[in-house]
Image: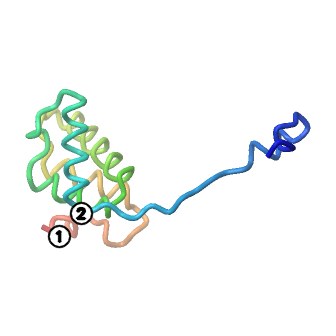
């Protein structure tokens, strides 16, 4: 490692990465993570309807980053719809957009998951 610290090896050192495979998180922990993020942002737990939150938790498939991105997309859809509460109307397009390359991402199919 000391040899990598030399200036001549800077280009090689910048390409060295470290990765870890993390197990997927359970649905309860994902839902709790989302609610904790609402608390940090000063949003009420009723910002997402029960059905929308459940759909996002299932669609996140245990991946925190995906859950966060789906929530942000649903919030953007709510702004476009000029509403303060996220329901299936906002969650389904957000999920469909995030999974556009997958055939199961059709909004009607997402509503059937409930």
Q: Is residue 65 above or below residue 112?
A: above
Task: Using the numbered discs, state the Cα–Cα distance from disc 2 to disc 1 in whole angstroms.
Answer: 9 Å
- Judging from the image, what secondary structure is the residue with disc 1 in? loop
Question: Disc 2 or 1, which lies upstream in sequence?
Answer: 2
Q: Position of residue 43 (x, y in %)?
A: 16, 31
Q: Nearer the viewer, residue 110 or 64?
A: 64
- Residue drawn 36% across the image and 72% down it: 103
Q: Which mark is residue 58?
A: 2
Q: Nearer the viewer, residue 111 or 46?
A: 46
Tag 2–tag 1 contact (CB < 8 Å): yes
Q: Is residue 82 above or below residue 16?
A: above
- Residue drawn 21% across the image and 65% down it: 110
Quarter of the rendering occupied by the C terminus: bottom left
Q: Residue 83: which quarter of the image?
A: top left
Q: Position of residue 105 (x, y in %)?
A: 31, 66
Local crowd size for mark 1, using a 10 Å CA cut-off: few (<14), some (14–19), many (≥20): few
> Mark 1 sits on what residue?
113
Q: Is residue 39 above or below residue 91?
A: above
Q: Nearer the viewer, residue 10 or 76?
A: 10
Q: Residue 109: which quarter of the image?
A: bottom left
Q: Position of residue 32 (x, y in %)?
A: 20, 48
- Judging from the image, what secondary structure is the residue with disc 2 in? helix
Q: Is residue 29 above or below residue 85?
A: below
Q: Position of residue 81 (x, y in %)?
A: 18, 38
């Amino acid at each position: 490692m000391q040899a990598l610290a030399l200036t001549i090896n800077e280009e090689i050192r910048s390409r060295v990465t470290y990765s870890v495979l993390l197990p997927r998180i359970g649905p309860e922990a994902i839902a709790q993570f989302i609610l904790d993020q609402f608390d940090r942002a000063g949003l009420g737990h009723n910002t997402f309807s029960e059905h929308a939150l459940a759909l996002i938790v299932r669609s996140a498939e245990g991946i925190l980053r995906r859950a966060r991105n789906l929530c942000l997309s649903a919030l953007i859809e709510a702004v476009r719809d000029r509403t303060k509460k996220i329901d299936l109307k906002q969650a389904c397009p957000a999920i469909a957009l995030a999974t556009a390359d997958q055939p199961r991402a059709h909004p009607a199919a997402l509503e059937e998951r409930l």
